[in-house]
């Protein structure tokens, strides 16, 4: 198959791994020197294929270690949107020098892209797209596109623009090739075009592309002028990036800007220490909660045996619920206005899950008492205390975990900030209050 430059790649039999595949697999575990040595050992065609497949961070890594002449050669291999990503990942003091390595037309395109926020559609798009005039006929359009094909980002679609560069229609290459050469383009094109504004967040762009099953989507400004296209490969990168960021937030840490193996120990500590400190301070409230029930614990030490069971069940149910809702929000399956429907569903779910765990807890206490006599004569009130507490704590944990992402989004923050550890910490404290309040009520006559 051809490389991105149009040159044929080395012939590789089916199932055989080439040097590019081997280097791509080994790349994360290689040292800086090993990476450079392995890259320089590739043939020109393989080196180009490998370099163009790297992430922006790895592009910066490679360019920083190249001589200036090599650096100019390789950065000019990148498409304008990829070059813009590389420059955005470069420290500010080196950006101008990197821009100067581009030829004048590419420099103008990259500078225009850098004017957009990194996470906006404008910062994600490529300005090199197939454009046609509405007065063309099909044959003329095909001849024009054939001459321009080498400089285009993709040839899935061609976009019809008027004299003011406003988007008036779109036509696929299949439609062009299937139409008579003298047929007017206005009769072939589709006038209703799905487009996104240049200020739309990249995650929303990915959703629009996925919902409409598109290979590329046009980007327009406030006046309707077409500025570029976002292709499906860019969307895949966005989905991967956003999913990684959300997973890190759900895990209770600040998002990382670099792959794990490329992140320094100091950065790992800094990104994780803040949330851990917050969660630790939150967990300290459990000691305060238990001190409020000190008399009950002293009178019935057996209650303390079930504290880990109770609070972990509530934390686990809350973490499950928050993870489900965060993911549903990310996929657009639920929105803020669905909070009431979600709360009703999770209330029923929480009660059911709590009842299942309560039954298991009852069987465990009664069975263990029959085998060892560990809980004394009041084992039945204790078993029902644990059972009722589990129903209450699991139901509360499920509701809290489901509602917290809605609250955080309503406040204008990322719902993924409702991390599983945060939900678990919050439910731990409230779960203790529920457990000992139930125990105080149900065991008052039996133990005190």
Image (cartoon, rainbow, N blue to C red):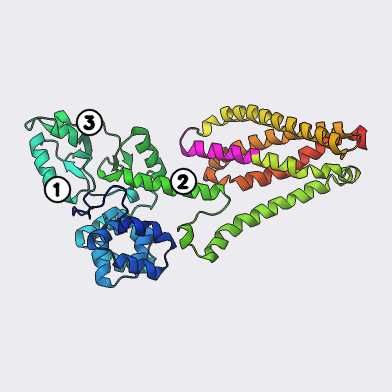
Q: Give the residue number, with chain letter if any, for mark 1.
A: 148
Residue 349 sits in which quadrant? Answer: top right
Q: Is residue 153 left or right of residue 415?
A: left
Residue 191 marker: 3
Q: Residues within 10 Å of mark 1 (few under 14, many from 20)?
A: some
Q: Nearer the viewer, mark 2 or mark 1?
A: 2
Residue 109 sits in which quadrant? Answer: bottom left
Q: Nearer the viewer, mark 1 or mark 3?
A: 1
Q: Residue at x 10, y 34 (%)?
A: 138
State whether residue 140 is above or below residue 125. above
Q: Position of residue 125 (x, y in %)?
A: 30, 48
Q: Is residue 222 left or right of residue 5?
A: right
3D distance between C-alphas at marks 3 and 2: 34 Å
- Residue sitting farthest toward the bottom: 67
Q: Is residue 332 magenta?
A: yes
Q: Is residue 156 left or right of residue 24?
A: left
State whether residue 389 is above or below residue 121. above
Q: Which segment did they paint magenta?
A: 317-333
Give the structural element (helix, strand or loop) at label 3. Answer: loop
Q: Quadrant of the C terminus?
A: top right
Residue 412 marker: none
Q: Give the residue number, with chain letter if any, for mark 2.
A: 243
Residue 343 sits in which quadrant? Answer: top right
- Residue sitting farthest toward the left: 182
């Amino acid at each position: 198959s051809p490389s991105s430059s149009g040159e044929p790649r080395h012939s590789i039999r089916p199932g055989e791994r080439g040097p590019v595949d081997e280097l791509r697999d080994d790349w994360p575990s290689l040292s800086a020197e090993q990476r450079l040595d392995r890259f320089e050992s590739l043939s020109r065609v393989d080196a180009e294929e490998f370099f163009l497949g790297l992430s922006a961070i790895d592009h910066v890594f490679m360019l920083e270690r190249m001589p200036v002449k090599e650096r100019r050669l390789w950065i000019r291999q990148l498409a304008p949107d990829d070059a813009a990503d590389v420059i955005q990942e470069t420290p500010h003091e080196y950006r101008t020098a990197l821009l100067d390595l581009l030829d004048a037309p590419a420099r103008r395109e990259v500078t225009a892209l850098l004017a957009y926020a990194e996470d906006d559609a404008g910062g994600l798009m490529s300005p090199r797209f197939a454009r046609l005039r509405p007065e063309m006929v099909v044959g003329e359009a095909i001849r024009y596109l054939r001459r321009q094909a080498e400089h285009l980002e993709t040839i899935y679609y061609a976009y019809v623009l008027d004299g003011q560069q406003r988007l008036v229609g779109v036509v696929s290459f299949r439609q062009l090739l299937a139409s008579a050469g003298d047929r007017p383009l206005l009769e072939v094109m589709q006038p209703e075009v799905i487009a996104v504004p240049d200020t739309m967040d990249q995650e929303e762009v990915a959703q629009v592309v996925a919902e409409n099953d598109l290979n590329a989507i046009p980007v327009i400004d406030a006046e309707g002028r077409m500025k570029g296209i976002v292709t499906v490969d860019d969307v895949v990168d966005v989905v991967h990036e956003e999913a990684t960021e959300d997973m890190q937030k759900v895990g209770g840490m600040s998002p990382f800007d670099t792959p794990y193996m490329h992140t320094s120990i100091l950065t790992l500590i800094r990104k994780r220490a803040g949330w851990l400190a917050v969660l630790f301070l939150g967990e300290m409230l459990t000691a305060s909660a238990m001190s409020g029930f000190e008399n009950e614990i002293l009178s019935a030490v057996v209650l303390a045996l079930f504290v880990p069971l109770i609070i972990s069940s509530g934390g686990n149910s809350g973490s499950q619920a928050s993870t489900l809702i965060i993911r549903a929000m990310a996929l657009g399956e639920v929105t803020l206005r669905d909070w009431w429907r979600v709360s009703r569903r999770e209330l029923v779910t929480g009660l059911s899950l709590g009842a299942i765990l309560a039954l298991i807890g009852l069987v465990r206490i009664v069975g263990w008492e029959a085998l060892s006599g560990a809980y004394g004569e009041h084992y039945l009130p204790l078993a029902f205390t644990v059972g009722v507490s589990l129903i209450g704590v699991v139901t509360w944990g499920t509701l809290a975990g489901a509602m917290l992402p809605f609250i955080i989004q309503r406040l204008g923050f990322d719902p993924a900030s409702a991390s599983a550890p945060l939900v678990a910490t919050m439910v731990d404290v409230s779960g203790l209050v529920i457990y000992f309040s139930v125990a105080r009520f149900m065991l008052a006559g039996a133990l005190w």
